Amino acid sequence: MDDLEEARMNVLTEWTALVCKELGVDPAAVDRDLILDLTKEVAHGVARPAAPLTAYLLGLAQGAGTAPEDAVAKLTTLARNWERATTETLTDG
Protein backbone atom coordinates (compact mmCIF):
# COMPACT_ATOMS: atom_id res chain seq x y z
CA MET A 1 0.00 0.00 0.00
CA ASP A 2 1.46 3.36 -0.95
CA ASP A 3 1.42 6.40 1.35
CA LEU A 4 -1.53 8.06 -0.38
CA GLU A 5 -3.68 4.94 -0.19
CA GLU A 6 -2.72 4.45 3.46
CA ALA A 7 -3.68 8.06 4.23
CA ARG A 8 -7.05 7.57 2.54
CA MET A 9 -7.71 4.41 4.56
CA ASN A 10 -6.81 6.27 7.76
CA VAL A 11 -9.30 8.99 6.86
CA LEU A 12 -11.97 6.34 6.21
CA THR A 13 -11.23 4.71 9.55
CA GLU A 14 -11.41 8.03 11.39
CA TRP A 15 -14.56 9.10 9.50
CA THR A 16 -16.28 5.78 10.16
CA ALA A 17 -15.49 6.00 13.87
CA LEU A 18 -16.70 9.59 14.10
CA VAL A 19 -19.93 8.94 12.20
CA CYS A 20 -20.65 5.81 14.24
CA LYS A 21 -20.17 7.79 17.46
CA GLU A 22 -22.41 10.60 16.21
CA LEU A 23 -25.17 8.19 15.14
CA GLY A 24 -24.87 5.81 18.09
CA VAL A 25 -23.82 2.88 15.91
CA ASP A 26 -21.43 0.18 17.10
CA PRO A 27 -18.39 0.44 14.80
CA ALA A 28 -17.93 -3.32 15.11
CA ALA A 29 -21.28 -3.76 13.35
CA VAL A 30 -20.02 -1.90 10.24
CA ASP A 31 -18.32 -3.90 7.51
CA ARG A 32 -16.87 -0.90 5.72
CA ASP A 33 -15.04 -2.91 3.06
CA LEU A 34 -18.19 -4.87 2.18
CA ILE A 35 -20.17 -1.65 1.71
CA LEU A 36 -17.35 -0.07 -0.32
CA ASP A 37 -17.25 -3.14 -2.57
CA LEU A 38 -21.03 -2.99 -3.02
CA THR A 39 -21.02 0.68 -3.91
CA LYS A 40 -18.15 0.15 -6.35
CA GLU A 41 -20.16 -2.55 -8.16
CA VAL A 42 -23.25 -0.32 -8.26
CA ALA A 43 -21.31 2.73 -9.45
CA HIS A 44 -19.68 0.76 -12.26
CA GLY A 45 -22.58 -1.53 -13.16
CA VAL A 46 -25.56 0.79 -12.80
CA ALA A 47 -24.68 4.48 -12.40
CA ARG A 48 -22.41 6.44 -10.09
CA PRO A 49 -25.29 8.25 -8.30
CA ALA A 50 -26.92 4.88 -7.62
CA ALA A 51 -24.06 3.90 -5.29
CA PRO A 52 -24.82 6.20 -2.32
CA LEU A 53 -28.54 5.71 -2.89
CA THR A 54 -28.10 1.94 -2.69
CA ALA A 55 -26.06 2.22 0.51
CA TYR A 56 -28.74 4.46 2.01
CA LEU A 57 -31.57 2.11 1.03
CA LEU A 58 -29.64 -0.85 2.42
CA GLY A 59 -29.22 1.07 5.68
CA LEU A 60 -32.92 1.85 5.82
CA ALA A 61 -33.82 -1.80 5.25
CA GLN A 62 -31.28 -2.92 7.84
CA GLY A 63 -32.58 -0.41 10.38
CA ALA A 64 -36.16 -1.48 9.75
CA GLY A 65 -35.18 -5.12 10.15
CA THR A 66 -36.31 -6.00 6.63
CA ALA A 67 -32.93 -6.54 4.95
CA PRO A 68 -32.24 -10.23 4.36
CA GLU A 69 -28.94 -11.60 5.67
CA ASP A 70 -27.58 -11.84 2.15
CA ALA A 71 -28.81 -8.38 1.08
CA VAL A 72 -25.37 -7.15 0.05
CA ALA A 73 -24.76 -10.26 -2.05
CA LYS A 74 -28.16 -9.88 -3.72
CA LEU A 75 -27.56 -6.19 -4.47
CA THR A 76 -24.07 -6.88 -5.78
CA THR A 77 -25.44 -9.54 -8.13
CA LEU A 78 -28.20 -7.19 -9.23
CA ALA A 79 -25.64 -4.48 -10.05
CA ARG A 80 -23.42 -6.92 -11.94
CA ASN A 81 -26.39 -8.07 -14.02
CA TRP A 82 -28.00 -4.66 -14.39
CA GLU A 83 -27.52 -4.31 -18.14
CA ARG A 84 -28.99 -7.73 -18.84
CA ALA A 85 -31.85 -7.20 -16.39
CA THR A 86 -32.82 -3.86 -17.91
CA THR A 87 -32.56 -5.27 -21.44
CA GLU A 88 -34.87 -8.14 -20.49
CA THR A 89 -37.30 -5.73 -18.82
CA LEU A 90 -37.38 -3.44 -21.85
CA THR A 91 -38.03 -6.34 -24.24
CA ASP A 92 -40.82 -7.93 -22.15
CA GLY A 93 -44.33 -7.32 -23.27
Image (cartoon, rainbow, N blue to C red):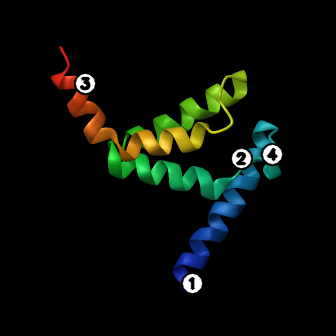
* Label 2 to label 1: alpha-carbon separation: 25 Å
Q: Which comes before the other along the chain, label 3 or label 1? A: 1
Looking at the rendered structure, the kind of residue marked 4 is Lys
Residue annotated with mark 1: 1
The mark nearer the N terminus, 1 or 4, is: 1
Of tags 3 and 4, the one toward the viewer is 3
Please give the residue where the numbered disc 4 appears in the rendered image.
21
Q: Viewed as shown, does residue 25 lie left or right of 82?
A: right
Q: Tag on residue 19?
A: 2
Mark 1 residue crowding within 10 angstroms, few (<14) / some (14–19) / many (20+) = few
User: Disc 1 residue type?
Assistant: Met
- Identify residue for label 3: 89
Q: Secondary structure at mark 2?
A: helix
**Res. 1 image quadrant:** bottom right
Instruction: First in sequence, mark 3 or 4: give its number.
Output: 4
Q: Amino acid at mark 2?
A: Val
**Residue type, numbered disc 3:** Thr
User: CA separation, marks 3 and 1?
Assistant: 42 Å
Q: Residues within 10 Å of mark 3 (few under 14, many from 20)?
A: few
Asked whether the residues under the numbered discs 2 and 4 touch, taking CB atoms below 8 Å apart as contact, a structural biologist would say: yes
